[in-house]
Amino acid sequence: QVQPVESGGGLVQPGDSLRLSCRVSGRWFSIDPMAWYRQSPGKQREMVAAILRGGDITYADSVKGRFEISKDNANNMLYLQISSLKPEDTANYYCNKWPPKIVPRGFWGQGTQVTVSS
């Protein structure tokens, strides 16, 4: 299998917005729940947003109202619209299957780095 490919990160100022993109290969994308995760140095990877079976969406409390996840099944793309960025949002952002325990070994992509700094 081909790992997901994330893009769209960058160095931004507090209060800015970004749109992260994730390209996924495989017909399973339109069926399986997907999520965005993030990890910063010294911390565990955490889910920030997920699209579940049936289309239900869930967000981590820390990002509710600021992050919006969306999915384009026709083009195998997953997006994360981020607004009102805070320094604590600084992390490497990844997309993958949800929940993380079903992600095959070695199937994590490189992620896309988001750095929020004034």
Image: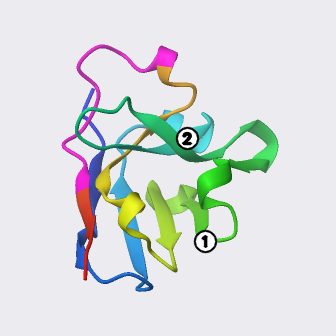
Comparing labels 2 and 1, the label whose residue is closer to the camera:
1
In which quadrant is the C terminus drawn? bottom left
Total marks placed: 2
Q: Which residue is mark 2?
A: 34
Q: Which residue is mark 1?
A: 66
Give the main secondary structure of the magenta stretch: loop
In the image, what residue occupies the spot 43% across and 71% down? 86
The residue type indicated by label 2 comes to Met
Q: Is label 1 in a helix, a strand or a loop?
A: loop
Is residue 16 found inside the magenta-colored segment of the image?
no
Q: Position of residue 95 (x, y in %)?
A: 40, 45
Residue 7 in which image quadrant: bottom left
Image: magenta residue range: 101-112
Q: The N terminus appears in which quarter of the rendering? A: top left
List x then y, in percent, for residue 115: 25, 66
Classed neighbour count for the residue bearing mark 2: other residues with Cα under 10 Å, few (<14), some (14–19), many (≥20) = many
Q: Disc 2 to disc 1, how far (Cα)?
A: 19 Å
Q: Three-letter amino acid code at disc 1?
A: Arg
| Residue plotted at (71% across, 40% down) | 52
Q: Quadrant of residue 12?
A: bottom left
